[in-house]
Amino acid sequence: MQKRALVVGLGIAGMSAAIGLRRAGWTPVIVERAPERRTWGYYIFMFQEGLQAAADLGIADHLHTRNPEWRPGGNSWTVDRRGRRKPALGLLDAPSGLASVLRSDIEAALWQGIAGDGAEDAVEVRFATTPVEITEGAGGVQVLLEDAGAGKRYREDFDLVVGADGMRSSVRRMVFGPDEDHLVNWKAMICAFQLKEQVPSYEASDSILVARPKRAVWVFGLADHAPCAWLTYRTEDVPDRFAGSAIEQLRAVFAGMDDNPVVRHVLDSLEEAPDHVFDSIHQVKMPRWSTARVVLVGDAAWCMNTYSAMGSSSSLRGGAALGVALQEHPDDLAAALDAYETGLRPYITRQQRSARVKQQRFVPSSRPVEVLGSVVLELIRKVVHRRMTAEYTASSAPAAPSGTGR
Ligand SMILES: Cc1cc2nc3c(=O)[nH]c(=O)nc-3n(C[C@H](O)[C@H](O)[C@H](O)COP(=O)(O)OP(=O)(O)OC[C@H]3O[C@@H](n4cnc5c(N)ncnc54)[C@H](O)[C@@H]3O)c2cc1C
C-alpha cells in the first residue's frame, strides 16, 4: 500500500515537497489554512539552485520568468542625496542563470505540477484546513485536523507529516517547541508590494535603489509586469511595529527621505496597493528538522529571510531533496530523514551565514557601510557593464555573410 503524507501549507515548500513525495511513490495530501489558493506575489530573485530544483521537480517549463532585457548603460539606478541618479549594478548583472519572477509565478508553476497528468495523479488539496494536534506513534502519526469551512474536527492517520507552513509554522510549534526557541530576530522590517506604475521618468523595466543608513527603498523592474517595491528598515523595537497601519508606520520611518520622488512615489503607491506584506525579519535556526515522523521544509525549517534572496530557491530544493531521500530509502524512513538532513544542511548553513553580508547590500547599517558598499559596487559595475556592453554589441552586430560570396 502507498504511504500517505500530510503536507501542511500550500506555499512553495509544501507544493515542492508534495511533488517530491509523489515522485517517491508516496500519496501526499496538502492542507492549507487559507480558503483558496493565493495568486498574489511580491518580487522574487531566483538563483541557479532554485531554477535547477524547478527542473528537477519537472516544473521548469511552467515557470514564467520576467527578466528585463539588458541595455547598454544598464537598467538599474541608485539615487544619491541630491536626487541625482547614477547607473548601478543590477541584481541580474551577473553570470547567467538568475531569474526575476513574482512569488505567484513559482506557485502557479508548482500548482500545475501538483495537478499532474490527470485526476489520478493530482495531489489532493484541502483548503481552510489546519492541524490542531499531532501525535506520533511507532506505526504512524495521527493528526487532529480542523476544517474551518465545514466547522468540524476529525482525526486522520498518516505515515509522515511535512510541516511547510512558513516562518511562523504551527507544526514546528506543536512538535519542536515555541517560536522563541527557533526564531532569531533580525531587528528589521520589510514591506513588499506591486506598484501600479513605474516611478515617473524611468523606463518601465528599470530597477531603482534609494539607500540610506538603516532605511532603503527598492523598485524592481520586470519585463512584462509593473515593477514591485520594497520598503525595508532596521529597528530596535520590532514588536511595536505591528501597532497601527503599515502605511502610517512607513511614512514615519521614511520621513526625511520622502522629498525624493522615488520614495514619494513608492509610499503613495502603497496607499492604493490592493495587497502587500508587512512583516518583521527573522531567521529560523534548528538543530534538527525532523523527528521520527514529522519533518519540516522551507521557511518552517530554515527561513533564511528576505535579505538572503534564497528562500524560494531553498524551498524548491528542500522539497526536491526530501523526495529524493524518500525514494532512495523506500523502506527506512529514519534513514531517509537523515539523508535529507545531512544532504541539505551544509548548503542551508552557508546561505544563512551569507544573508548577513547580503543585508548590507539591501539596507546598509551605517553611513560608512553605505559609502564603502557604493564604492565597491561601482568598481564591480564598471567591469561587469564593460563586459555586458561588449556582449550586447557583439550579439546585435549584423551577422557576417556566410561563405566566400561572389
Ligand atoms: C518581501 C519578501 C521578499 C522575498 N524575496 C525573495 C527573493 O528575492 N528570493 C527568494 O528566493 N526568496 C525570497 N523571499 C522568501 C520566499 O518568499 C520564502 O522563503 C518562500 O516563499 C517560503 O515558502 P514556504 O512555502 O516555506 O512558506 P510560505 O510562503 O510562508 O507558505 C506557507 C503556507 O502555509 C500556509 N499555512 C500557514 N499556517 C498554516 C496552518 N497552520 N495550516 C495550514 N496551512 C498553513 C500559509 O497560508 C501558506 O500558504 C522573500 C520573502 C519576502 C517576505
Image: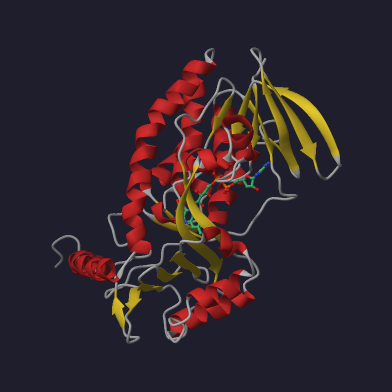
Rendered residue at 30%/62% (across/down): 93
Q: Is residue 370 positioned above or below 24 on the image?
A: below
Quadrant, the C terminus: bottom left
- Residue 159 vs residue 333: left or right? right
Query: Hey, which quadrant is residue 307 in on the image?
Result: bottom left
Q: Residue at x 63, y 43 (%)?
A: 10
* Left/right of residue 166 with respect to residue 148 in the rendered view: left
230 sits left or right of 130 in the view: left
Figure check: 82 above or below 68: below
Taking depth in this image into account, of 238 and 28 the one nearest to the observer is 238
Q: Camera-side residue: 392 or 239?
A: 239
Q: Is residue 245 above or below residue 97?
A: below
Quarter of the image with the N terminus is top right
Q: Is residue 287 visible?
A: yes
Q: Is residue 269 above or below residue 137?
A: below
Q: Position of residue 118 (x, y in %)?
A: 68, 36
Taking depth in this image into account, of 261 and 316 the one nearest to the observer is: 261
Q: Is residue 97 visible?
A: no
Q: Position of residue 174 (x, y in %)?
A: 64, 33
x and y percentages locating residue 253 in the rendered image: 49, 74
> Where residue 103 appears, x then y in whole percent?
54, 55
- Based on the displayed image, in which of its 4 quarters is residue 175 positioned? top right
The residue lying at 38 percent from left, 44 percent from top is 352
